[in-house]
Every structure is written in structure tokens, then in C-alpha cells.
Image (cartoon, rainbow, N blue to C red):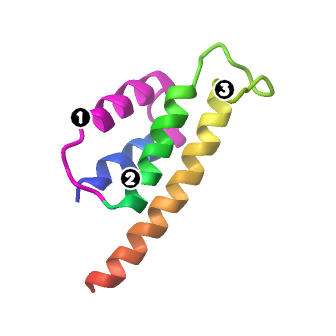
């Protein structure tokens, strides 16, 4: 399932396997070029990550976030929350196919 490439990328970022710069570059590229159809719930989760990545600014420090700029720390928090939602969605989807 194509969704696992997003899950892996998010996990690699949260677990510091890749840098924030690598995550930002790769996520934006993958999401913008996605050709697979997805339901509205999945799209909402992945688009939320896209919006968070788009708001990330390397010169923004914790506590200085605005509605349009977030720090790496805030980005990790938002990615972690999205990962919880994504895992829940995947677990519920697996129930339907078992």
C-alpha cells in the first residue's frame, strides 16, 4: 500500500534517522507528485503533514511559532500526532480486510 512510504518517512524523521531538511524535501516531493487515489480521511492526515512542513522555518525557535512559521520541535510534535492518526486509520483498515 502506497501509504507506507509516508509512514516510513514520518517515522524516520521522528526517530532522527533523517534530518529535518531531508524530511522536508522528501515529503514535499512525494506528496506533490502522488498519483494514487486516497480517501478523505487519509488525505486529511497527509495534507495536514504537508501544511506543517510548509510552515516549518529553520530560523524559527520553540516559543516563537506563529500561524505561518513553526520550529523543528513543533514540526516533530505535529508529525507525531499525524502518525498516531495514520496508525489508527491503518489498524482500522486492516480490520476491514481481515
**Secondary-structure class at tag 1:** loop
Which sits in the foreground, 40 or 89?
40
**Secondary-structure class at tag 3:** loop
The residue beneath circle 3 is 71
Q: Give residue 96's quadrant in the image.
A: bottom left
Q: Residue at x 81, y 27 (%)?
A: 63
The Cα atoms of the two marked residues, 1 and 3, are separated by 25 Å
The residue beneath circle 2 is 43
Magenta span has 39? no
**Secondary-structure class at tag 2:** helix
The Cα atoms of the two marked residues, 1 and 2, are separated by 14 Å
Q: Choose the circle earlier in sequence order: 1 or 2.
A: 1
Q: Is residue 9 above or below residue 83?
A: above
The Cα atoms of the two marked residues, 3 and 2, are separated by 24 Å
Magenta span has 16? yes
Q: Residue placed farthest to the top in the image?
A: 59
Q: Point out the stretch of residues depicted in magenta.
A: 13-38
Q: Please provide percent x and percent y for residue 84.
A: 54, 60
Q: Please provide percent x and percent y for residue 81.
A: 59, 53
Q: Give residue 98's quadrant in the image.
A: bottom left
Q: Is residue 9 above or below residue 21?
A: below
Rate crowding at label 2 as few (under 14), some (14 to 19) or many (20 or more) other CA atoms within 10 Å: few
The circle drawn on residue 33 is 1
Q: Residue placed farthest to the right in the image?
A: 63
Q: Is residue 69 left or right of residue 28?
A: right
Q: Residue at x 57, y 27 (%)?
A: 55
Q: How many marks?
A: 3
Amino acid at each position: 500500500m502506497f501509504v507506507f512510504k509516508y509512514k516510513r518517512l514520518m517515522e524516520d524523521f521522528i526517530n532522527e534517522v533523517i534530518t529535518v531538511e531531508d524530511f522536508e524535501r522528501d515529503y514535499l516531493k512525494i506528496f506533490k507528485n502522488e498519483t494514487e487515489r486516497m480517501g478523505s480521511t487519509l488525505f486529511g492526515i497527509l495534507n495536514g503533514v504537508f501544511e506543517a512542513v510548509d510552515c516549518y522555518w529553520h530560523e524559527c525557535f520553540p516559543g516563537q511559532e506563529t500561524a505561518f512559521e513553526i520550529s523543528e520541535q513543533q514540526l516533530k510534535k505535529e508529525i507525531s500526532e499525524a502518525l498516531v492518526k495514520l496508525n489508527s486509520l491503518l489498524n482500522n483498515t486492516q480490520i476491514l480486510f481481515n
